[in-house]
């Protein structure tokens, strides 16, 4: 990760098709296209690759989450359970609909703790949204059981784990709805973009229409289409879809490269007894986008991160001190800094953030280090990096 590291001729060729006919929009203009429908083609390719009946492309991963929630009828005052460790997009997408993000603790999978999820369910809860962070997944069997028991919708955000599988099925294809991001730093990129995945025909129809101003997409005269309900514009462009199409064809290649690089580094670190690795739920296979491991405490993690920097080991994070991915630094959410007034329901619904501490999440995030696995490293670079990481951690633990 990310796919842009290996951007090349195939991406250029798909883009050139679009530039040659000049139709940058995914809908209409049938006569001018020379048969090129990149967004439609990418949707078909996503359905095949990720084993779902329907894929709806949208303009971003954040839009994908909002559209997914909307398709399931989730809105004002509804509660959506999500993890404390994710990208800020998760709560943004929920709040855009006037719904209320209910943040709950993670466990040693670095994703939703099913026990914490069950404790957070109220009569307002409508959906559970696990976020498969850093290339691995939540315990989806446990979450599916909870959803069945309480009649809740399961929405997977697999923006960071495209290419990973659970019980042999691609992430994003398992819940009622799945969301992907194709932004610039994801395993396959379109520059910007996202997708909603589902096997539910009605959800798909909603997503298709809602993401294009509520257009019914019947016939081939856009001007004559009716609007079954209100929508917005979350369309992807043909330019973005063209790049995504070329990248998706390389997903297996990217995962294989990551697995090779990940395995070399993991093997080196596994010789340090105090290092443990994140738990991957039984039946899960990572996308190997990151190697995530635990150190004995926060203090050690901070020292290791500092020493990594001094030793030229980039792209490793301890998210405890991170502004984008962990609740601890989301002051703007906790104090509700918005440009515009929020509904009373949302304000009241988020009161809990002023007082709730997430000790269990702090415990895991404080001790965790996640390192990005790059596609462009040579074998020598990976081995050299693995050796250096081993030495840095070994020295710090020896002196503490
Ligand atoms: C990147 C990301 C998103 C949002 O994707 P954008 O395409 O950047 O809007 C959502 N969730 C997670 C976990 C992400 O990593």
Image (cartoon, helix red, strand yellow):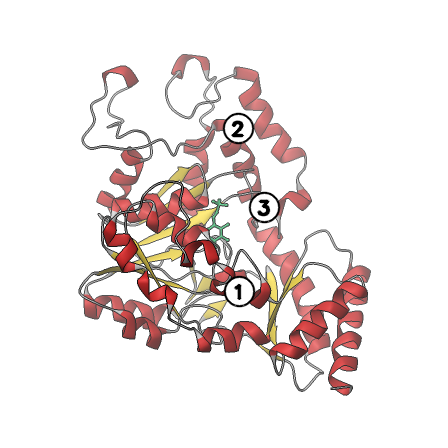
Question: On screen, 329 above or below 33?
Answer: below
Cα–Cα span, label 3 and label 1? 17 Å
Apparent side of residue 371 relative to residue 198 in the rendered image (left or right)? right
Q: Secondary structure at mark 3?
A: loop
Q: Name the residue rendered at 58%, 61% in the picture.
A: 322
Is residue 265 visible to the viewer in this orientation of the structure? Answer: yes
Q: In terms of secondary structure, where does tag 2 sit?
A: helix
Q: Is residue 12 left or right of residue 393?
A: left
Q: Which residue does the image show at 57% across and 74% down from the upper left?
A: 366
Residue 213 placement: quadrant: top left
Mark carried by residue 239: 2
Asked whether 312 or 347 is in front, the reply is 347
Sequence order check: which comes first, mark 3 or mark 2? Answer: 2
Q: Residues within 10 Å of mark 2 (few under 14, many from 20)?
A: many
Give the mark nearer the N terminus: 3 vs 1.
Answer: 3
**x, y percentage for residue 303?**
71, 74
Front residue of 67 and 167: 67
Picture disc at residue 173 = none
Mark number displayed over residue 286: 1
């Amino acid at each position: 990760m990310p796919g842009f590291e290996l951007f090349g001729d195939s991406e250029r060729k798909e883009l050139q098709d679009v530039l040659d006919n000049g139709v940058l929009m995914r809908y209409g203009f049938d006569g001018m296209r020379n048969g090129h429908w990149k967004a439609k083609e990418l949707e078909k390719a996503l359905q095949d690759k990720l084993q779902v009946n329907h894929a709806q492309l949208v303009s971003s991963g954040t839009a994908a989450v909002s559209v997914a929630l909307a398709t399931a009828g989730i809105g004002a005052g509804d509660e959506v359970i999500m993890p404390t460790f994710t990208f800020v997009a998760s709560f943004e997408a929920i709040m855009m609909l006037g719904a209320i993000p209910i943040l709950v603790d993670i466990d040693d999978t670095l994703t939703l703790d099913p026990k914490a999820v069950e404790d957070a369910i109220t009569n307002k809860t409508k959906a559970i949204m696990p976020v498969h962070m850093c290339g691995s997944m939540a315990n989806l069997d446990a979450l599916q059981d909870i959803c069945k028991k309480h009649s809740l919708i399961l929405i997977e955000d697999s923006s960071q784990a495209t290419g990973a599988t659970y019980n042999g099925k691609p992430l994003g294809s398992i819940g009622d709805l799945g969301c992907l991001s194709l932004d610039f730093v994801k395993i396959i990129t379109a520059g910007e973009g996202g997708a909603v995945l589902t096997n539910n025909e009605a959800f798909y129809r909603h997503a298709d229409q809602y993401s294009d101003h509520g257009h019914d997409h019947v016939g081939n005269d856009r001007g004559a289409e009716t609007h079954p309900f209100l929508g917005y514009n979350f369309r992807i462009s043909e330019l973005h879809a063209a790049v995504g199409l070329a990248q998706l064809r390389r997903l297996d290649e990217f995962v294989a490269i990551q697995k090779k690089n990940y395995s070399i580094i993991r093997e080196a670190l596994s010789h340090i007894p105090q290092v443990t690795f994140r738990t991957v739920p039984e039946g899960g296979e990572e996308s190997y986008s990151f190697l995530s491991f635990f150190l004995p405490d926060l203090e050690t993690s901070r020292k290791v991160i500092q020493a990594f920097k001094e030793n030229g080991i980039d792209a490793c994070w301890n998210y405890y001190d991170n502004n984008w991915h962990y609740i601890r630094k989301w002051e703007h959410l906790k104090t509700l800094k918005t440009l515009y007034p929020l509904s009373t329901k949302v304000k009241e619904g988020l009161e809990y953030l002023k007082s709730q501490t997430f000790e269990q999440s702090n415990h895991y995030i404080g001790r965790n280090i996640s390192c990005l696995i790059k596609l462009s490293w040579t074998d020598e670079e990976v081995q050299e990096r693995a050796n250096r990481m081993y030495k840095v951690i070994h020295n710090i633990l020896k002196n503490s």
